[in-house]
Image (cartoon, helix red, strand yellow):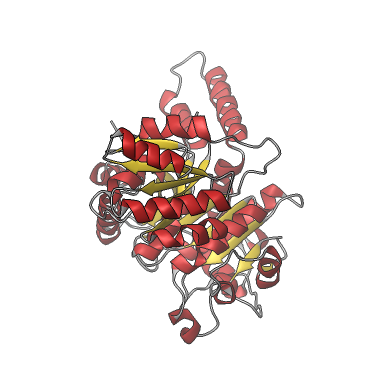
Amino acid sequence: MTQPARVILFTTDESAAPEIRRQITALPRVKIVAELDEPCLLAQAVSQFPAEVVVVDIDRSTDVVLECVSQLTQAFRELVVFALSSETGGDIVLRAMRAGVKEYLVKPLKAEDFAAAVARAVTQKTDQKAPGQLISIMGTAGGVGTTTLATNLAVELAGLVGEGGKVAIVDLDFRFGQVATLLDLHGQFTVADLCHTPEQVDPELIEKAVVKHESGLLVLARPHSFAQAETITAAHCASVFTELQELCDYVVVDGPTRHDPGGRIVLDAADTVLMVLQLLVTSVRSADRMLQELATQGFNTDRISLLCNRMGRESAHLEISHVEQTLNRRIYATVSDDWNAVSSSINVGKPLNAEFGRSKVRREIQELARRFHEPEALAAEAANRSGLLGRIFKKGAKPQAAATEAAAVTTASPAQTKPA
């Protein structure tokens, strides 16, 4: 099993960067929390983003980069720094080691080499609390129900962790975000108040900025004005996510809504990305384009799980199997269409579990939350149901397809598997 690791990546080689990202994030418990192209910013990044490993590409401006690495390792004695280079000469390796580099990796980087280096160099402290899971909910188009799903998923997770845990939701639609509206909340501070400092955000400031919902959910709302929205990007929120993960068991992000370098920073930091689509050709085509573009940029698309929303509406002959065949990926979860429950919930400012707890859409979102929080319990329930069906039909043909499907739904991880 790969050692958990948060990585800060420095490289100025744009042509090699996608493949470097791809190999690093190919490991299931490793993610990139910051990416730099200026060596002088390394110390600031280490101060701002908690990370176990710093990967430094030293092929260009080697002398300057190694000097910055030397200063970095002297200032942060316990920091683990990996050098990455296409050079294998003994002189450059020796210089890197003298600068404080723990591991020297050769291009092209291979995931297995990186995993072995992490296992050798990174020691997990037994008393160290693991950071909370970051779950990004992104839509293939506006209006697919991303905000409703993100908000209600966060509320369900807050109920599952109970009083001993914390769950937060961050609204990344800086202009038109409606997370706070869906929960009928009004706060003095917003995400904009936390995104204008180069240093790591203070935990006390985070506590002041979030608004606590009656469910226990911590809400970080969008900016109050368009003027504030113009001054921040998803990249500005990176340190906010980092601090929230230190405080919470789960951080749900409604977004990113823009697929630019800033938005990709959010996706790089996420443990799981739920991509929301509908049974519409336009939505499926958008999903295909997004997946292809992210793969081109070096993002590990295996961390993207497809969620099909508003199932049950007339789909004009488009079915789940068509979507899976087109995208060459399994649908991770589906949520039913229930216009009455969802629209009423939005209009009264109450989550589904408060006003429509017995509705099918609420039960499906609740099960989605359980797949994150208690997958073992769901797997056991699926096995019990399968066993019961077997006993009921023991004298006849066993409904194998139904039992297999039930088990698959409850035991699958958020990472996507491709159909055979």
Whether residue 246 can be seen here: yes
The reply, left or right, for residue 411 in relation to residue 296 is right
Q: Quadrant of the C terminus?
A: top left
Q: Residue 115 is drawn in which quadrant?
A: top left
Picture coordinates of residue 383 (x, y %)?
A: 56, 25
In front: 341, or 50? 50
The reply, left or right, for residue 172 in relation to residue 286 is right
The reply, left or right, for residue 350 in relation to residue 338 is right
At 60% from the left and 49% from the top, the residue drawn is 132
Q: Residue furthest top?
A: 395
At 64% from the left and 56% from the top, the residue drawn is 167
As drawn, 139 above or below 380: below
Picture coordinates of residue 198 (x, y %)?
A: 53, 69
At 40% from the left and 63% from the top, the residue drawn is 263
Whether residue 341 can be seen here: no
At 45% from the left and 63% from the top, the residue drawn is 255
In front: 185, or 253? 253
Picture coordinates of residue 220 (x, y %)?
A: 60, 69
The reply, left or right, for residue 208 in relation to residue 173 is right
Q: Residue 190 is drawn in which quadrant?
A: bottom right
Q: How many marks?
A: 0
As drawn, 201 above or below 411: below
Picture coordinates of residue 6 (x, y %)?
A: 50, 46
